[in-house]
Amino acid sequence: MVRLLQLSPHTRVLLERPNIVSPPITAYDNQQECQSLNELDRIQDNEDRLYVEALLIRERILLLKKSERLFQPLLKRAMVLAERTEFDRCLNLLFYTFYLYQQMELRTGLHHFVWIFCRMLNANVPIRADHF
């Protein structure tokens, strides 16, 4: 995956296409898409950060196309975070995913939230009201 990511800056230069960087958001741990090979080199051994990098790239590309293929990796990531009991990070990602569904005017249910709330209650983790 790192090799593919390393080709991107070279390709952008050849095609004279600047990389449009989104502002950092909580759902992606306030990370931004790498802009240079040096930045990619710094994250190449960090599996979590590489996954976030891939999510950022997918969003940049698929959101413009309003492609529903954007959502499966986001939901998979939320499940991984829940399995690790990183519930705040999981909820941030689920709220953002819900926002993207609305932005793309797609129907979605609340079953992902019910699932995470059940996981939290089962782990005796309080559901904070400030999430809402």
Image: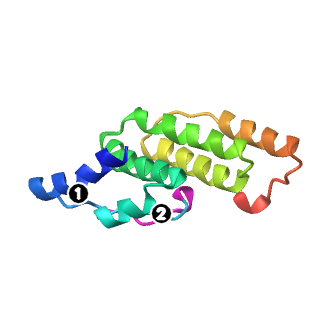
Q: Could you tell me which residue is drawn at 77 percent across and 43 percent down?
A: 117
Helix, strand or loop for the magenta stretch, by majority: loop
Whether residue 125 sits left or right of residue 34 in the image: it is: right
Q: Is residue 35 visible?
A: no
Q: Quadrant of residue 1?
A: top left
Q: How is the image coloured?
A: rainbow
The residue wearing badge 1 is 9
Q: Could you tell me which residue is drawn at 42 percent across and 53 percent down?
A: 53
Of the numbered discs 1 and 2, the one sitting upstream in the chain is: 1
Kind of residue indicated by mark 2: Gln
Instruction: Tell me: residue 57, above or below residue 18.
Output: above
Q: Nearer the viewer, residue 35 or 21?
A: 35
Label 2 Cα neighbours within 10 Å, binned few <14 / some 14-19 / many ≥20: some
Tell me the tag on residue 70: none
Whether residue 71 sits left or right of residue 57 in the image: it is: right
Label 2 SS: loop
Kind of residue indicated by mark 1: Pro
Across and down, in percent, residue 66 comes to 35, 39
Across and down, in percent, residue 110 comes to 66, 37
The magenta stretch is 21-28
Image quarter hosting the C terminus = bottom right
Judge depth for marks 1 and 2 and give the one in front: 1
Residue 45 belongs to magenta span? no
The residue wearing badge 2 is 31
